[in-house]
Image (cartoon, rainbow, N blue to C red):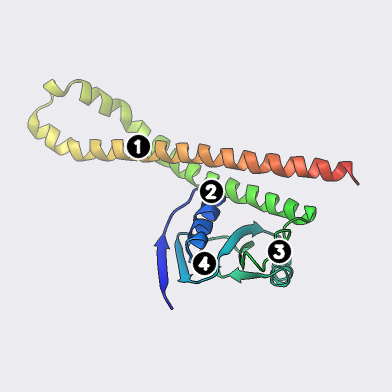
């Protein structure tokens, strides 16, 4: 049986799901996910489709059972910090499309997705602030002053301080990049929170 492994890093679940389903359309069935970036597929003659859904940890086994009854298989995944997320794959001609139609399940999904994005945004934000403001910022004025007066700095002194200057600039760049990435993930958090709030309001209206 032919197998293939793909290495991909995704900043949001929607793009990850779209990638998996593109592989499904090309005749590859998802078999295993490791570290959130290593995707293992097996060749198949059937067309599958995959959905990623989140549930409460206490409901994971119950959700898997419901998925199996609806024609899905639960794809194992490990070392990705997503213990309450399920990768569900099923054949297009057998799996039920309305598996995820229950409002309570949707509410749990959006709640866990927004919590996931919040965590994903906080970690790079803290690291970015650490690199930018704690490690590099105190030395930045001196670095700028040296760069503005390069003609007055001797070559011997320049050779000694150049590695430190490069390191400071690199740390600052890393910090800014992490902060920008964190801002992007916070947008995803806000979007999922908006979906959660909207669904909760709609549910309350019909109670």
Q: Nearer the viewer, mark 4 or mark 1?
A: 4
Pointer 3 and pointer 1: residues touching (CB < 8 Å)?
Answer: no
Give the mark, 3 or 2, whose residue is nearer the N terminus.
Answer: 2
For marks 4 and 1 on the same chain, the one whose residue lies earlier in the sequence = 4
First of labels 2, 4 by sequence position: 2
> x, y (%) of residue 17?
55, 55
Q: Secondary structure at mark 2?
A: loop
Q: Given this view, does label 2 or label 4 mark the residue nearer the observer?
A: 4
Find the distance from the CA under tag 3 to the CA under tag 2.
Answer: 25 Å
The quadrant of the picture occupied by the N terminus is: bottom left
Marks 1 and 2 sit apart, C-alpha to C-alpha, by 23 Å
Residue found at x 44% / y 53% = 9
**Residue 145 sits in quarter:** top left
What residue is disc 3 on?
Answer: 96
Crowdedness near tag 2: few (<14), some (14–19) or many (≥20) residues, C-alpha within 10 Å: some
Residue beneath disc 1: 173
Left or right, 7 with respect to 167, comes to: right
Q: Residue at x 82, y 42 (%)?
A: 202
The disc at residue 30 is 4
What residue is disc 2 on?
12
**Element on which disc 4 rests:** strand
């Amino acid at each position: 049986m032919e197998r293939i492994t793909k290495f991909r890093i995704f900043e949001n679940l929607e793009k990850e799901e779209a990638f998996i389903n593109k592989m499904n359309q090309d005749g590859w069935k998802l078999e295993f996910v490791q570290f959130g970036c290593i995707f293992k597929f097996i060749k198949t003659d059937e067309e599958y489709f995959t959905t990623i859904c989140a549930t409460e940890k206490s409901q994971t086994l119950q959700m898997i059972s419901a998925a199996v009854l609806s024609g899905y298989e639960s794809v194992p995944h490990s070392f990705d910090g997503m213990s309450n997320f399920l990768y569900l794959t099923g054949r297009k001609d057998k799996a039920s499309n309305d598996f995820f139609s229950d409002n309570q399940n949707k509410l749990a999904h959006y709640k866990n997705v927004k919590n996931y994005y919040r965590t994903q945004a906080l970690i790079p934000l803290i690291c970015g602030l650490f690199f930018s403001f704690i490690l590099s910022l105190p030395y930045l004025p001196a670095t700028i002053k040296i760069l503005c007066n390069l003609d007055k700095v001797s070559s011997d002194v320049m050779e000694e301080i150049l590695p430190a200057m490069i390191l400071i600039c690199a740390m600052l760049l890393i910090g800014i990049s992490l902060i920008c990435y964190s801002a992007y993930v916070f947008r995803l958090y806000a979007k999922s929170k908006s979906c959660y709030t909207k669904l909760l309001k709609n549910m309350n209206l019909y109670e």
